[in-house]
Amino acid sequence: MATFGSTDDLHGAEFVDTDLRGARFVGADISGVVMRGVQAEGVEIDAPWLFDGENVLLVNGVDVVPLVDAELNRRFPGRADRRATDPEGLATAWDRLERTWAATLARVDTMPSGTVDVSVAGEWSFAQTLRHLVLATDTWLRKAILGEEQPYHPYGLIDVATADDGFDVTVLAQDAPSYGEVLEARAGRVAMVRDVIAGVTPELLASSRPNPHDPAHPETVLSCLHTILEEEWEHHRYAVRDLDVIEGSEGA
């Protein structure tokens, strides 16, 4: 099977009568791709930034972005609150998110031992997902909003894109922590977000902070909190998706 990486430039390439069955695109930029007369049965697309800005995704001439957004809101009650703009709305949004994660953690507790370390199709395990959310909170809350010089918990888990940005990985633990240690770190970060949201004012939400990935481009405190909420809901969706697969394989 041919593999194309970041050094392969396929920008503007044209595929005519090409067999791409079973192909897998990971971290690829397919914005602006046009497909005509294609066989697309069973195609699966996961685009976490699909709802940013004024994006469109046309299928047979129909923009499906609003439909997908509405369906995800139906499947995950509370997700629609992630764009709240005032202190009260943000408090409600975080409370609903906390209760959603609590239910998922309780579900995992009923599953067989070792479930938290199972990877589905090469994706992060449940424990790894929680570790990444620790890092995401440290990035957008402790670094961006609170301005801490060294905001990172050693149990945080970095993604490839952030590592490529020159992140100092020496602040992170080399050995994987136990699940109990992950839960403790995660609970601490959840409480931090809750406490910060409890104390925000409209003036604070509108105040500017350096973007933690690109300090030359400022963010508001509100946009930083929105990023945290987006990270939480997207990774919860991934976690539930993979837990469903794990449960399905147990019953097979």
Image (cartoon, grey):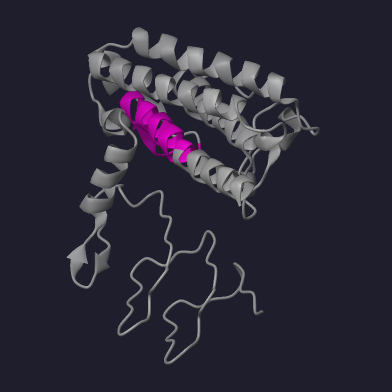
The x, y position of residue 17, in whole percent, is 43, 92
Residue at 58% over, 30% down: 130
Question: Relative to residue 8, is residue 11 drawn left or right?
Answer: left
Note whether 224 is above or below 89 in the view shown.
below
Question: Relative to residue 141, is residue 176 drawn left or right?
Answer: right
The answer to whether residue 165 is visible is no
Main SS category, magenta section: helix
The x, y position of residue 214, in whole percent, is 47, 40
Single out the residue that lies furthest toward the bottom.
Answer: 17
Residue in front for this viewpoint, 65 or 29: 65
Residue in front for this viewpoint, 168 or 100: 100
Toward which corner of the image does residue 75 lie, by quadrant? top left
**In the image, is residue 156 part of the stretch drawn in magenta?**
no
**In the image, is residue 217 part of the stretch drawn in magenta?**
yes
Residue at 70% over, 20% down: 180
Question: Relative to residue 87, is residue 174 drawn left or right?
Answer: right
Residue in front for this viewpoint, 26 or 149: 26
Toward which corner of the image does residue 37 lie, by quadrant? bottom left
Toward which corner of the image does residue 138 lie, by quadrant? top right
Note whether 50 is above or below 72 in the view shown.
below
Residue at 33% over, 31% down: 223
Note whether 246 is above or below 233 in the view shown.
below
Bounds of the magenta span? 213-236
The answer to whether residue 41 is visible is yes
